[in-house]
Amino acid sequence: MKTGLATVVTLLCGALVAHFILQDNGYVLIHFRGYAIEMSVPVLVALMILTYMGVRLLVQTLRTPRRLGEAAGRYRQRKASERITRGYIEIGEGNFARGEKLLTRGARNSETPLLNYLAAARAAQAQGDRERRDNWLRMAYEQEPKAAAAVLLTQAELQLENEEFETCRATLNNVLEMTPNNAEALKLKAQLCLQRKDWRELEDILPRLQKRGHVPVEILDEWFVRTWSELIKESASAPQEIVSLWKQVPKRLRSEPRLLRSRVDALVLDGQAAEAEKILRKALDREWNEPLILLYGTLEADAAAQLRYVEKYLLKRPEDAALLLTAARLCVRNELWGKARSYFDTSNSIRPSAETWHDLGQLMLQLGEGDSASEAFQQGLSLTHAGSAAPKLTNKLGSDPASV
């Protein structure tokens, strides 16, 4: 604008100078449809400049309403952005009602109205108003119909958080109908199945979710372990089904203690303690695991063979408290009382536990040593109840342990 004005002024000054300085101002004749117009060159230049300025003025006048509208729009957008920012800050600080109000007031003038309505829906739920929450979600969908999946996923997430399990399931099914491999929908449905303990459906979802790579491996493995552990427990009366389930378990998870415990428990219930013992032994040979060695000591298979296996391990791990406890329990089953007591005492000297003291107390009762049994039980209770005193047992019926 400034450059144009400077050009016009320069031309005008040049024309005037030329008019006064030049002796011959030039002559211009314009003939048009019988009309003749005569003028000097400076006059023609002046007329052209005036015409140009008039056109520019007219154009600027015509553009003024649009520019005023654009300026007003920019102002409204700036104010809306400020309200939205304050709205998010209020929500972040826990002022959900204030934040919701600010977000929705600025939504229509926002560049991202969808995000405003979704955030407002979360704020409404935080205030316990499901109806208003669903209203904002509906407005979000009306604002951006192409973002239907995103709106439904937000709705499902809020429904799950609010324990609206059946409506959450229906919402997620709608998303999966539109996009069958939607990773976020599969993740939310897996979380729903975990809360509802729907292990069969979760078994179907997890492999699909694993392919999407949407969930960290450690979390996914935890879900796999929980699912198969529960399914194996449910199939305790169907050995063939357990075998089929076990084949689906990834090899990296087959030594997981909870899975092995479920499988071992199912085999024991089916009367296959020997098979369970073999499975545990293989798992322990592959990788030492304290929960598994403790589980091994509870199996009622070949007690003598089990004790030999454990004592062989003791040569390598003589100060392992869990291994010593397992050896003591197997000695009790083999009626090796003195050896069992020695293992219990050694285990307690390394790492005292209420469980070990309890088993030692039971052994003392078995041997008719009431005072020693009472002392052992008291030691165990002191560990369980943070040092609180427990009454000593008195065998008032005599020395026969069966009468205690």
Image: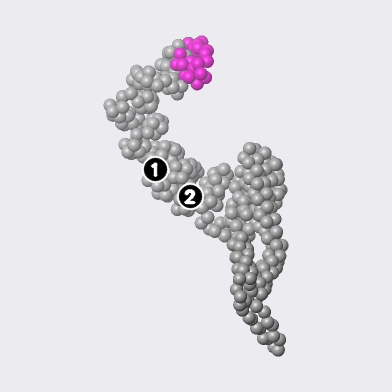
Task: Name the residue nearer the viewer: 278 or 317.
Answer: 317
As for residue 377 lying within the magenta part, the answer is: yes
Q: Amino acid at mark 2?
A: His
| Residue found at x 60% / y 47% | 157
Q: Amino acid at mark 1?
A: Arg
Cα–Cα span, label 2 and label 1: 23 Å
Q: Splitting the image into 4 quarters, where does residue 296 fall?
A: top left
| Residue found at x 57% / y 59% | 177
310 relative to 181, above or below: above
| Residue found at x 66% / y 44% | 87
Residue 400: x %, y % from top left: 45, 14
353 relative to 19, above or below: above
Residue that badge 2 annotates: 214
Q: Which residues are magenta?
A: 375-398
The N terminus: image quadrant = bottom right
Dot label at residue 254:
1
| Residue found at x 43% / y 13% | 372
As for residue 190 lying within the magenta part, the answer is: no
Residue 215: x %, y % from top left: 48, 47
Task: Name the residue nearer the viewer: 344 or 10.
Answer: 10
Residue 348 is at least partly visible in this image: yes
Task: Name the residue nearer the viewer: 110 or 94.
Answer: 110
Q: Splitting the image into 4 quarters, where does residue 376 fall?
A: top left
